């Protein structure tokens, strides 16, 4: 296949070579298991049924999952085989099926869900670096978009992720997500449909975070949930060599209040640790 799934628009034949995502056309997976550290309406009490794919369409210098995002690792799964694994996750009682870093395998995910549609919500857990056309094609399959807005400028997208076109594509894709998937909860407070917009606060780049908060308030307040994340710690090739200072995070928390963002989740500063990074099996 000549691949145009993400905004990189490689156009490479992934049956022959890898794209910029470090993936060929084989769907490689490094973890299939319940996960308990997503936002509360995703994890609930029984966990989110996560499927972690190897490779990534981004190239973030601070990637905490670099062990699997930067290499062609993990076990190859066909859509029928993955469908059987999803059945096992459902039998464990998970609240949803959560595809993590799914962009470069979105075509295989659709094939899988055509074989077996779980009786629980489908979560598309993405960096936000998406083509709006691909997001539109996923609407019949996805119930919940768990998406990032990492940067509010093209310069920072280039500086930290080598993706100058990150912001423009993220903005267009998020608009589609929020418009097409209004918030819907079950009687227990679990999310059945909707969008959670995540933002990881980077030390030294607080102005970027304030701009992202303003963007969310102006466009999607009361239409989606905001999740402010403080879990940054120096990892991979990060040019930032420290965690957040309390005063930096306080500025972001104050902006949430100033902008009236009430539907939100806020991480504690103690989350900046490797403890919450899942264990991966690169041979699964």
Image: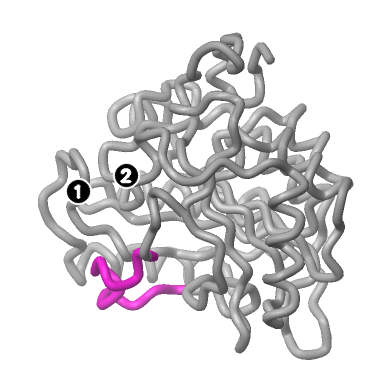
Q: Of tags 1 and 2, which is closer to the observer? A: 2
Q: Quadrant of residue 189?
A: bottom right
- 211 or 156: nearer the viewer: 156
Residue 211, given in percent of the width and then of the height, sits at 43, 46
Could you tell whether 87 is left or right of 35 in the image?
right
SS at badge 2: helix
* Residue 147 circle label: none
Q: Position of residue 190 (x, y in %)?
A: 72, 80
Q: Is residue 269 above or below residue 219?
A: below
Q: In the rendering, at what x and y percent does residue 23 appear?
A: 50, 28
Q: Residue at x 33, y 65 (%)?
A: 230
Q: Is residue 217 visible?
A: no
Say few, some or many: other residues with alpha carbon within 10 Å of mark 2 (under 14 / 14 to 19 / 20 or more).
some
How crowded pointer 1 is (Cα within 10 Å; few <14, some 14-19, many 20+) is rated as: few
Viewed as shown, does residue 161 lie left or right of 50? left
- Secondary structure of residue under mark 1: loop
145 up-or-down from 169: above or below: below
Work out how far the residue at label 1 is from the one at label 2, CA to CA, in angstroms.
22 Å
Q: Which residue is mark 2?
A: 66
User: Sequence-wise, which precedes: disc 1 or disc 2?
Assistant: 2
Judge whether residue 261 is colored magenta: no
> Which quadrant is the N terminus positioned in?
top right
Image: magenta residue range = 266-278
Q: Return the residue nearer the eye: 284 or 271.
A: 284
Residue 204 is marked as 1
Q: Nearer the viewer, residue 17 or 96?
A: 17
Q: Is residue 267 magenta?
A: yes
* Residue 283 location (% of width, % of height): 41, 49
């Amino acid at each position: 296949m000549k691949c145009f799934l993400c905004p990189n628009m490689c156009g490479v034949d992934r049956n022959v070579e890898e794209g910029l995502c470090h993936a060929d056309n084989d769907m490689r997976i490094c973890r299939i298991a319940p996960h308990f550290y997503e936002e509360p309406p995703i994890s609930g009490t029984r966990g989110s049924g996560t499927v972690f794919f190897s490779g990534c369409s981004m190239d973030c210098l601070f990637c905490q999952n670099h062990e699997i995002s930067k290499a062609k690792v993990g076990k190859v799964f066909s859509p029928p085989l993955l469908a059987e694994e999803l059945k096992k996750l459902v039998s464990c009682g998970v609240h949803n099926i959560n595809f993590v870093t799914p962009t470069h395998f979105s075509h295989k995910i659709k094939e899988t869900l055509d074989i077996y549609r779980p009786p629980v919500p489908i979560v598309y857990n993405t960096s936000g670096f998406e083509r709006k056309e691909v997001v539109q094609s996923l609407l019949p399959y996805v119930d919940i978009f768990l998406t990032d807005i990492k940067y509010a400028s093209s310069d920072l997208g280039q500086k930290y992720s080598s993706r100058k076109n990150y912001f423009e594509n993220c903005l267009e894709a998020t608009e589609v997500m929020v418009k097409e998937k209004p918030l819907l909860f079950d009687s227990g407070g679990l999310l059945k449909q909707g969008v959670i917009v995540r933002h990881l606060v980077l030390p030294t780049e607080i102005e970027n975070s304030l701009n992202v908060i303003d963007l969310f308030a102006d466009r999607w307040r009361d239409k989606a949930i905001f999740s402010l994340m403080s879990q940054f710690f120096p990892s991979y090739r990060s040019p930032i060599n420290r965690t957040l200072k309390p005063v930096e995070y306080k500025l972001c928390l104050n902006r949430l209040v100033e902008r009236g963002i009430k539907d939100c989740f806020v991480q504690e500063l103690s989350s900046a640790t490797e403890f919450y990074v899942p264990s991966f099996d690169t041979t699964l």
